[in-house]
Amino acid sequence: MSETTPLPTPDTAPDATPDAAPEAAPQAVPAVAPTSPAECAQQLKQLFPALFGGAVKPFKLRIQIDIQERAPGKFSKQTLSAFFRRHTGATSYLIAMTKAPHRFDLDGQPAGEITDEHRKVALDELSRRRGNQEERRQLEEQQRRNRAGLLHDFQATTLTKPNFCALKGVPVDELDGLLEIARGEAEERARQAPPPRHAPAFDRPRRPGPDGDRSGRGGRGRG
């Protein structure tokens, strides 16, 4: 049975010699302390105000590489990734993607076109968000109407609270909270209601004079 030849190790490799000086260990790169996306945004605004200050601008592709080259050791990869995920997902950034003529670099200079595909992705996402917002608005309005109806019926009912809740399908322990919200919403509607309009003076009926003349001239004859 033949013996298996062991794999060479650094000590037994052909070019290793007993008196060879050991290589210096690579110097450790200090780790960059992670920061929050909000802190990262402030630092980027200070370092690159032409891009991150003022109106929102679409970024040049692979802008993280440029940041690491221009500000080495300032940001960790995780910090930048977290910031860009939040920033590029904001509605303001999506709107900029649909309106800007091109992308921008760290100095605020044009740096590449916005492709039709990327622009369409932004438009589709904005459309989806508007749809969700309208659905939420309609749902909230329906809930306000339901609470207003609940308050109206509770003020008119002669039922006990448990029976009223059973009739309306509302948990007893939630009724008082819903009624309180409904009262607050009613007060808010009353404050926002426009004041009653008064008819202009010339639209008001005039009081007839002694001879029935509505001109109010008191039957004064014409000269």
Image: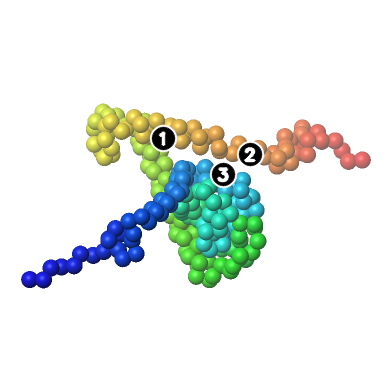
Name, please, the residue furthest toward the left: 1
Circle nearer the N terminus (3, 1) = 3
> In terms of image quadrants, where is residue 194?
top right
Note whether residue 13 is visible. Answer: yes
Between disc 1 and disc 2, the foreground one is 1
Q: Position of residue 214 (x, y in %)?
A: 75, 39
- Asked if the residues shown at circle 3 and circle 2 are in contact, with their CB atoms under 8 angstroms apart, the answer is no
| Nearest the eye: 215 or 180 | 180
- Tell me the distance, in whole angstroms, between the alpha carbons under discs 3 and 2: 51 Å
Q: Position of residue 1 (x, y in %)?
A: 7, 71
Circle nearer the N terminus (1, 2) = 1
Q: Which residue sits at x=32%, y=32%?
A: 175
In the displayed structure, would residue 113 be above or below residue 128?
below
Residue topped by disc 1: 182
In the displayed structure, would residue 214 be above or below residue 97?
above
Q: Secondary structure at mark 1?
A: helix
- Asked if the residues shown at circle 3 and circle 1 are in contact, with their CB atoms under 8 angstroms apart, the answer is no
Label placed on residue 42: 3
Q: Which residue sits at x=11%, y=71%?
A: 2
